[in-house]
Amino acid sequence: MRAVVTLLLLATACTVGEDTPAETALAPTIPRDVFMTLKDPAAAHAELCDHDPADLTFPDRADRITNRFCQDVKPGGVMPEPHGLADLLHILDLDFADPNGGNGTGGNPAFAILGHSSALTARKVSSITPTAFVFTPPLADGSLPPDYMFLAFDPGEQFVEVASFSPADMAVNFYLVLFDKVCGANCGPDDLLTPEQTTGWSNVRIYESTTALDNTIADCRQCHIGKGKDVPDTGDALILRMQELEAPHTHWFDASTTGGQALLHDFHAAHGTTEDYGPIPAALVDRSDPSKMAAFITRAGFGDQPNPFHSAAIEAEVIASSPMQPAINVPLGASAAWQAMFDPACAGQFIPAPYHDVKITDPQKLSVMTERYRQFRDGGTPHLEVDIRDVFLDSGLVDMGFAAPPELDGRALLVEQCQQCHNARLDPTITRDLFLVDKLDKMSRAEKDLAIDRLATPTDTRLTMPPPLFRTLGQRERDLMIVELRR
């Protein structure tokens, strides 16, 4: 009973409003040392292709990414070496046979484009730099391919994310595909926020979520765990995520919906209509179709999503409260249906709830970044010198889950800010399991002191907690959390 009462108190503390996060908050960046604990390319390949020598079927019945990249374990086989996104898509049978064709037809993969995310790069995803998903289309009879897969592309980073179904294990495996560019640690907007990002790759290496990857902030499993407990190597608890399964799929590009049209308008204002976007040919961008992705995920057995986003009800309430939505998103909208999903997320039960409004962008910031990118695209300036991803609406950051509601105390802040990654449902074999917010009263003094040190870390490193990429915290909030941990 005490646990229920505590949950209710936390939930009621998560009311939101137009509160701008403190100016002292760390910038939302991915630390340069975030992947330093991962193996080098050769060792990563050996780890990917490690298998029982008695299994003479390997890699034929493995998931597609393992199958394609582990062909060198077979006599005469060769490991592919992609030198760009186009090469990778071709290796995985996700390339576009007809760049002027259809979505999931005529030899093309299916695809959908997302303007607001709860995933690894969520703090960088908006209508100007959306996430592009390409995935294996259903077969002619509507059934699923035996080795289907999804690839997620975001500009600005030297990696892509992959989910790949294994026929042998009957489970979805999750991967991070890292690559290097010549610019290395000095890569800038020119290198990573333009079509230049998709070429000039080297040292491509692949890490499955059950490797050391799951003990980094790039852990796939903390978002893709279902309603059970994470048990590595079984796949039982891992699911494909799409919180907005229901039409009109609020934050997805879609020429058939009002919200989708508004997002497409903002995208084209910056990128025009002739620039390819990551894996998506320019002529096909407007054919983004989230309903195809929702249908596929449902058919694959993942239709029962934790804390689903009820798009139709939420959008109707937002428009009623702010009639200029979705084209004009200031003032913010409001929705009781959205609040009902935000509260349990704030109480640590689920990953952050998607924002209630269609647009997450500040109109003025978006206008400036759109013009800067347009000038570069049209040849008016030789270099893109700004990070065009800095377009988020400050007054909406709390509602987006990136900043903390201002009235939370230290304990509630630990839950809202940390419990998503530090809870007893996740893999108990990793060091992160030593700091479990849902078992805070049983935590050792030494572990609490270590957490205090991480909260007090002033620089952007992989040890900074909570990671600035996910949470925008000011010193006041950090101090409250430290006071709670000192009890």
Image: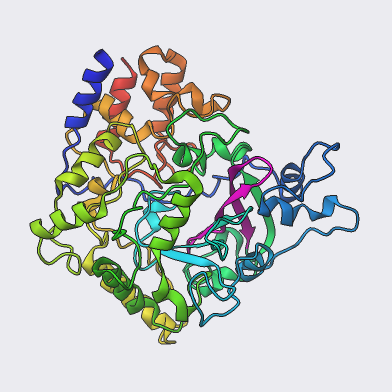
Where residue 213 sits: x, y (%)?
A: 59, 40
Residue at image location 40% in from the left, 87% down from the top: 380
Residue at image location 30% in from the left, 37% down from the top: 345
* Quarter of the picture holding the N terminus: top left
Query: Is residue 170 shown left or right of residue 113?
Result: right
Residue at image location 28% in from the left, 61% down from the top: 248
Query: Is residue 192 shown left or right of residue 177?
Result: left
Please say if 330 is above or below 472.
Answer: below
Residue 14, quarter of picture: top left
Query: Is residue 147 shown left or right of residue 310?
Result: right
**Of 358 and 100, the residue lying toward us:** 100
The reply to whether the magenta stretch includes residue 155 is yes
Residue 128, quarter of picture: bottom left
Where residue 293 sits: x, y (%)?
A: 44, 59
Span colored in magenta: 151-180
Where residue 170 sits: x, y (%)?
A: 62, 42
Residue 416 visible in the picture: yes
Residue 332 visible in the picture: no
